[in-house]
Image (spheres, coloured by chain):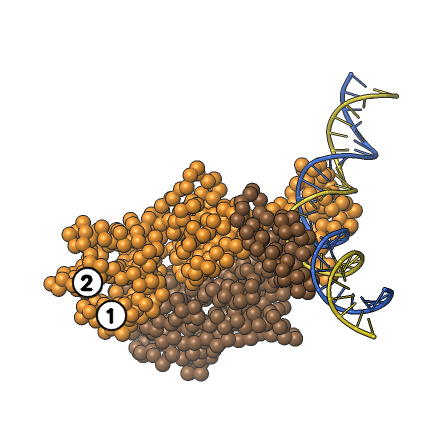
Chain colours: A brown, B orange, C yellow, D blue
Amino acid sequence: MTMQGRKATIYDIAKLTGASPSTVSAALSGAWKARRISEQKVELIRRIAAEQGYSTNMQARGLRQAKSGLVGMIIPVHDNRYFASMSQSFEAFARDRDLVPVIASSMRDPMEERRIVETLISYAVDSIFIAGATDPGAITDLCAAANMRHVFVDLPGPGAPSVISDNYLGARMLTQTLLAGVQPRRNPARDRIYFIGGVATDYATARRIEGFRDVLTEAGLPPSPEQIIACGYPPKRAMQEIAALRDRLGDLPAGLFVNSLTAFEGVLGHFVHLPPGSFDRSIIGCYDYDPFAAYLQFPVHMVRQDSHRLIEEAYRLIEDPAPGITVREVEPALIPPRTIYAGPFGEHG
Amino acid sequence: MTMQGRKATIYDIAKLTGASPSTVSAALSGAWKARRISEQKVELIRRIAAEQGYSTNMQARGLRQAKSGLVGMIIPVHDNRYFASMSQSFEAFARDRDLVPVIASSMRDPMEERRIVETLISYAVDSIFIAGATDPGAITDLCAAANMRHVFVDLPGPGAPSVISDNYLGARMLTQTLLAGVQPRRNPARDRIYFIGGVATDYATARRIEGFRDVLTEAGLPPSPEQIIACGYPPKRAMQEIAALRDRLGDLPAGLFVNSLTAFEGVLGHFVHLPPGSFDRSIIGCYDYDPFAAYLQFPVHMVRQDSHRLIEEAYRLIEDPAPGITVREVEPALIPPRTIYAGPFGEHG
DNA sequence: AAAGTTAGCACCATCGATTGCGCAAAACCC
DNA sequence: GGGTTTTGCGCAATCGATGGTGCTAACTTT
């Protein structure tokens, strides 16, 4: 690696090898067979290029080929087990395809989401994966105008293929488990199972509420509106709401369906102040899985969404788009309390 | 947005407005004042460009300007609270600077790490942040050859500025806390505090072991080699090792210094099989923080590394490089058991 | 009114890699 | 040996945005 100021280009290599730039390009890009470059020359060029520490300028290649070798993904936040493991899978599949992943977080802000889509389009990414879209319509419009392939994950969009978790099924499973475990206490209000967290207008939350409601209704215990507290994702709100609920009931409810890990953090923030044993007569479930949450003071039933499969299916849909607009559902799994699950990467879940 | 097949370019806008491409470029890139383009024309161009859904082709701009507007970061894994929150901060700071973050995970594989650095160089990223480098020397070599600014985070590198957590201090604090909390049981072996997890040759682990060792030595209890079990990061190994340890001792040790969240997952995986109450006479600490881990069956003392400050300092070092090679240390904080910490983004920790 | 300024913009080369086309030399064919 | 095919490679245009240079018309100055 002779190091001058600037990076070597195919023109430098051309001079050094006595070949033309186009020959160098072909030799190094792999197109040399089609261009009938002799293997000898290719060897020479490769050797010199390696010596010079040459590497393709992807901006130039991208400009010429009108694509970049990048794949974009938007997630609400990095700092969340569910989305983080989605990132991990997204990257693994990208690597398999020799693509470079660009992952940005929208903080669940529709404006930010649109800005990111525009940015990704500017960079001519191959395709865009949008997880937890807050404004799928706007995204599809932007992408359509730029002729950009995209797929929605976790929350469906009307104008593009989507891969989502079977939230209805997951909610049913979790609710059934809770229902089977409640300990009746003769107090009708306290005997109820409460649903907390999420945004009622979000597709995922709506489906989960449906599942929750249906199971309870089928059991002859149709939930009152008061039982469904969709107070958003931030822990803080959930903490306040659970405190308020406990105030109202005079105790914890018999069952609690927590709709996200972040809401669960908030619930825990409240539980911290309760004496031990406070939870013995309540059964807790959480939609989404965290290995540590699985081993708290009290048993927690969790639903693990298969983010790996979600991403896998999303790549499938992007790569050979079915006619029409597909929505594919992936089944989540119920994880019993005190279970450590090892994910697809061995190290994490 | 009139949608044809292809995206609009400055040439299209030029035709539509009767201006020249260079005028369009100047108008849209903000350089129009310096180029004395009339405000009128700029308005017109802006309007038409918006109508056409124009957006700058960043590959072309990048090629011309020899930079891309991207910043790269390498982390070991996404799916880890510590690194995920680093990603979140990295992205936030990038956004402040109008840069697009590209975050890739190396899976702690030196080869992969180098491949990623080469890729990022190919894309002409502005600078590269490397967290948890496994082969910092090779990275610095690659970057030097390409004249690429880079900074090491979390683990220092010899050839570039580094920002690291004060692992020695953190380990001292945690060890002291554990030491203060051990309940002597008259069995010398069981009364010891054990260190588990991490790789002894890793810089961070080495420093923590130093801190651990020093505190114990100062207390007149110098640790035997057997007390330090640096069995790597994957949960599985930690699970086996803790099981073996318990076999050897006939019980859990009086204190346990767990060196990472992933190792802690493994430890938990073993604890799952123990009867409740097994932990009452042990005191547990973990280097790294997780809100759920903070609220387990038993109290856990945790060390929270300030990933936000780490990244902030790293940007500082990249942006005005001090003469010579700087290593900056950021203090971690001790988080008492049962504490929910709200991070810089409100939603997570 | 001639000379000098300035405003407002267009022209064109350039960044590095790719690719359609063409051309000379070598190899092959009858 | 003349014609045909194949081999091996170079030439030059191209992708879209940028920026140095220059040119014209309007305006100012003396």
Location of residue B223 (image quadrant):
bottom left
Label 2, label 1: how far apart the Cα atoms are? 15 Å
Q: Quadrant of the C terminus of chain A?
A: bottom left
Residue A217 image position (x, y, % from top left): 45, 80
Callout 1: helix, strand or loop? Answer: helix
Location of residue A40 (image quadrant):
bottom right
Output the chain of dot 1. Answer: B
Q: Is A2 located above or below residue A262 in the figure?
A: above
Residue type indicated by callout 1: Ala
Callout 2: helix, strand or loop? Answer: loop
Instruction: Report which residue position mark 2 lands on.
Output: B254
Give me the residue at 70% from left, 48% from top.
B46
Give the camera-side residue of B90 and B103: B103
Residue B340 image position (x, y, % from top left): 34, 58
Disc 2 vs disc 1: which is toward the camera?
A: 1
Give me the residue at 56% from left, 58% from top.
A113
Q: Which label sits on residue B23? A: none
Give me the residue at 46% from left, 59% from top.
B111
Residue type indicated by callout 2: Ala
The reply to whether dot 2 and dot 1 touch (C-beta < 8 Å) is no
Instruction: Report which residue position mark 1 lands on.
Output: B244
Query: Residue lying farthest left?
Result: B186
Near mark 1 (Cα within 10 A), the count class, few <14, some 14-19 or many ≥20, is few
Output the chain of dot 2. Answer: B
Q: Is residue A54 visible?
A: yes
Give me the residue at 17% from left, 51% from top.
B219
Give the camera-side residue of A132 and A201: A132
Give the camera-side residue of A239 and B13: B13
Location of residue B245 (image quadrant):
bottom left
Which one is earlier in the sequence, the residue at label 2 or at label 1? 1
